[in-house]
Amino acid sequence: MSVITPPTTRPVEFGHERSAFMRLLGACQVADAPPGMVQIRLPELREELLNQLPAAHGGVLMSLLDSVMSRAASALPQAPSQTAVTVEMSSRFHRPGRGGLLAEGWVVQASRNLCSCAARITDTQGTLVATAQGTFKYWKAPTTLKK
């Protein structure tokens, strides 16, 4: 399956991670991501983020995939909102995630109201850990997101 990535994305402020949940995980959006892509880095897996293997808990991986796709949708220059909420999402876990992780998300197709995205997570060696695709709705009502 081929994936189309947009050539540019809307600039994001990087003073600190805007999501309290991502801060709780210890993850932060990467400032120098390639054009058309959003990246979130989880530099280390604390003990409370591990399953019994020990490896990254599936909920941690799903959260990274969901967040990076939502941000990719809202980063498009023509996006009608800076907030995109998940309508549906499917994921595949390819191997246990250990050490630092990098989630990368991009837009496959966008319309006025909905956006289809894809994402992947790799470990520090560049090995594929998980992939996902999802549909996101642009949220046009007020949010608590600070601009």
Image (spheres, grey):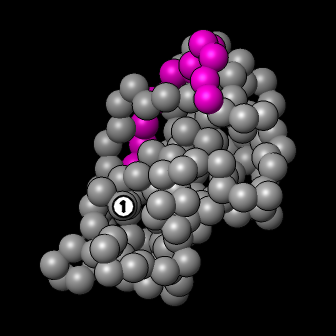
Residue 40 highlighted magenta (yes or no): no
Q: Residue at label 1?
A: 60
**x, y (%) of residue 8?**
81, 43
Indicate the quadrant containing the C terminus: top left, top right, bottom left or bottom right.
top right
Which residue is rendered at x = 36% and y = 61% of the image?
Answer: 60
- Mark 1 is surrounded, within 10 Å at the Cα level, by few (under 14), some (14 to 19) or many (20 or more) other residues, namely some
**Would you identify the image quadrant in which residue 52 lies?**
bottom left
Which residues, given as a range, are shown in magenta? 132-144
Relative placement, left or right, of 99 versus 71 is left
Which residue is rendered at x = 32% and y = 50% of the image?
Answer: 91
Relative placement, left or right, of 132 versus 85 is left
Which residue is rendered at x = 69% and y = 29% of the image?
Answer: 82
**x, y (%) of residue 29?**
66, 59
> Is residue 65 placed above or below 74 in the rendered structure?
below
> Is residue 118 placed above or below 79 in the rendered structure?
below
**x, y (%) of residue 86?**
43, 31
Relative placement, left or right, of 15 versus 18 is right
Relative placement, left or right, of 28 versus 78 is left
Along the line of sight, which residue is nearer the eye, 43 or 107?
43
**Would you identify the image quadrant in which residue 14 lies?**
bottom right
Along the line of sight, which residue is nearer the eye, 24 or 128?
24
Q: Judge whether residue 96 can be spotted in this image.
A: no
**x, y (%) of residue 118?**
50, 45
> Is residue 24 placed above or below 13 in the rendered structure?
below
Q: Judge whether residue 104 can be spotted in this image.
A: yes
Residue 137 highlighted magenta (yes or no): yes
Q: Of the residues shown, which amino acid type is indicated by label 1?
A: Val
Q: What element carries label 1?
A: helix
- Total residue callouts: 1
Which residue is rendered at x = 78% and y = 42% of the image?
Answer: 9
